[in-house]
Amino acid sequence: VIHHSDTIVALATPQGVSALAVIRLSGKDAIEITNKVFKGKDLTKQATHTAHLGTLHDNGKSIDEVLVTIFK
């Protein structure tokens, strides 16, 4: 059962090898969760309908360059 207050994540592009992957996070905690692995601007302080270039990190290691868009 999904509740309206849940934060969910899903691929928005087909799985597999490609030049671009879109991952969508939705829900009340999406920005805070993303901010924990995103290195760049503090996403919690950014306006809606904006895009931010940075890197995605796992355990301090850079995984990939990413573009995060915020829609509140």
Image: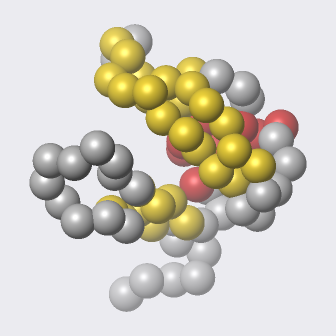
**Residue for point 23% across, 65% down:** 14
Residue 48: which quarter of the image? bottom right
Q: Quadrant of residue 67?
A: top right
68 displayed left or right of 62? right
Check the image and report above or below for 62 versus 27.
Answer: above
Q: Residue at left 49%, top 24%?
A: 55
Q: Depth check: 60 or 4 in front?
A: 60
Depth check: give the residue in front, 19 or 45.
Answer: 19
- Farthest residue in the top direction? 60
Residue 39 position within the rendered picture, expressed as x and y whole percent measured from the top left = 57, 22
Above or below, 46 against 71 in this view is above
On screen, residue 62 versus residue 26, left or right, reads left
Is residue 71 in view?
A: yes
Q: How many discs appear? A: 0
Can you give x and y, in whole percent of width and height, for residue 2 in the image? 43, 83
Q: Quadrant of the N terminus?
A: bottom left
Going 85% across and 48% down the picture, which residue do you hit? 47
> Could you tell me which residue is drawn at 72 percent across and 26 percent down?
41
Q: Quadrant of the C terminus?
A: bottom right
The percent coordinates of residue 44 (x first, y second) are 76, 40
Q: In the drawing, does residue 23 fall left or right of residue 16?
A: right
Residue 50 is left or right of residue 20, and the answer is right
The residue lying toward the viewer, choosing from 56 and 13, is 13
Reply above or below: 32 against 15. above
Frontmost residue, 21 versus 47? 21
Residue 19 image offset from top left, x and y in percent: 28, 44
Residue 36 visible? The answer is no
* Residue 17 drawn above or below residue 41: below
